[in-house]
Image (cartoon, helix red, strand yellow):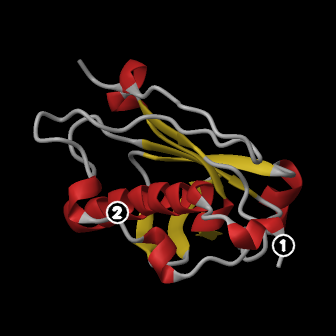
């Protein structure tokens, strides 16, 4: 057994739960549309396995690309593994498929909310993205924050500076 097999991987548990927040936010938009001034910036790794984007976009954005979901998008969908959306590039609609594990940043600037992820190097299963009902924001609207995991070191990250006052 390796040392990694002998410890609980809280970093991976937290990472999976936070990616579940992304999935759940997209599901809300699929069902109800973007409320108010909400909009999403989604940055993802273009060379991650399973990313499906046109070659000219991959050439233009080697390594990483950010898309904005605000006014003009269609065919938004998400499942346990992938996010899909159609966006227009130079007036040409293009269907993008992005594995949730390829997302490196998810932000909603309208409420000062952002999550930063470490690249996922292993396969995740559905349970890694499940967000319990009790894991969402408090009734007063507080909640959310930014999380950045380091390799194998533990650290406490205060989320207070990201909370809406």
The residue at the far left in this view is: 139
Q: Residue at x 28, y 65 (%)?
A: 132
Q: Earlier in the sequence, mark 2 or mark 1?
A: 1
- Among the 4 quarters of the image, the one containing residue 81: bottom right
Q: Which residue is mark 1?
A: 2
The percent coordinates of residue 50 (x first, y second) are: 73, 77
The percent coordinates of residue 69 (x first, y second) are: 45, 49
Q: Residue at x 29, y 37 (%)?
A: 143
Q: Are marks 2 and 1 in contact (CB under 8 Å)?
A: no
Residue 39 appears left or right of 85? left
The percent coordinates of residue 54 (x first, y second) are: 76, 68
Nearest to viewer (mark 2 / mark 1):
1
Label 2 CA crowd tier, 10 Å (few <14, some 14–19, many 20+): some
Q: Residue at x 42, y 28 (%)?
A: 159
Q: Secondary structure at mark 2?
A: helix
Q: Which residue is mark 2?
A: 24
Label 2 – label 1 distance at C-alpha? 34 Å
- Among the 4 quarters of the image, the one containing residue 147: top right
The percent coordinates of residue 9 (x first, y second) are: 62, 62
Q: Is residue 121 above or below residue 148?
A: below
* Quarter that holds the C terminus: top left
**Res. 11 visible in picture:** yes
Q: Is residue 98 above or below residue 81?
A: above
Q: Residue at x 38, y 46 (%)?
A: 71
């Amino acid at each position: 057994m390796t040392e990694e097999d002998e410890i609980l991987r809280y970093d991976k548990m937290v990472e999976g739960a936070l990616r579940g927040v992304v999935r759940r936010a997209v599901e809300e938009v699929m069902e109800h549309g973007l409320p108010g001034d909400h909009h999403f910036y989604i940055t993802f790794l273009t060379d991650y396995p399973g990313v499906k984007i046109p070659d000219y976009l991959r050439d233009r954005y080697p390594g990483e690309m950010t898309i904005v979901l605000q006014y003009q998008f269609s065919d938004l969908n998400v499942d346990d593994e992938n996010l899909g959306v159609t966006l227009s590039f130079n007036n040409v609609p293009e269907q993008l498929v992005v594995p949730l594990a390829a997302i490196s940043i998810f932000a909603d600037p309208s409420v000062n909310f952002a999550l930063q992820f470490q690249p996922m190097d292993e396969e995740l299963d559905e349970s890694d993205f499940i967000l319990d009902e009790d894991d969402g924001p408090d009734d007063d609207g507080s909640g959310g924050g930014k999380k950045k995991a380091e390799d194998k070191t533990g650290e406490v990250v205060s989320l207070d500076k990201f909370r809406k006052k």
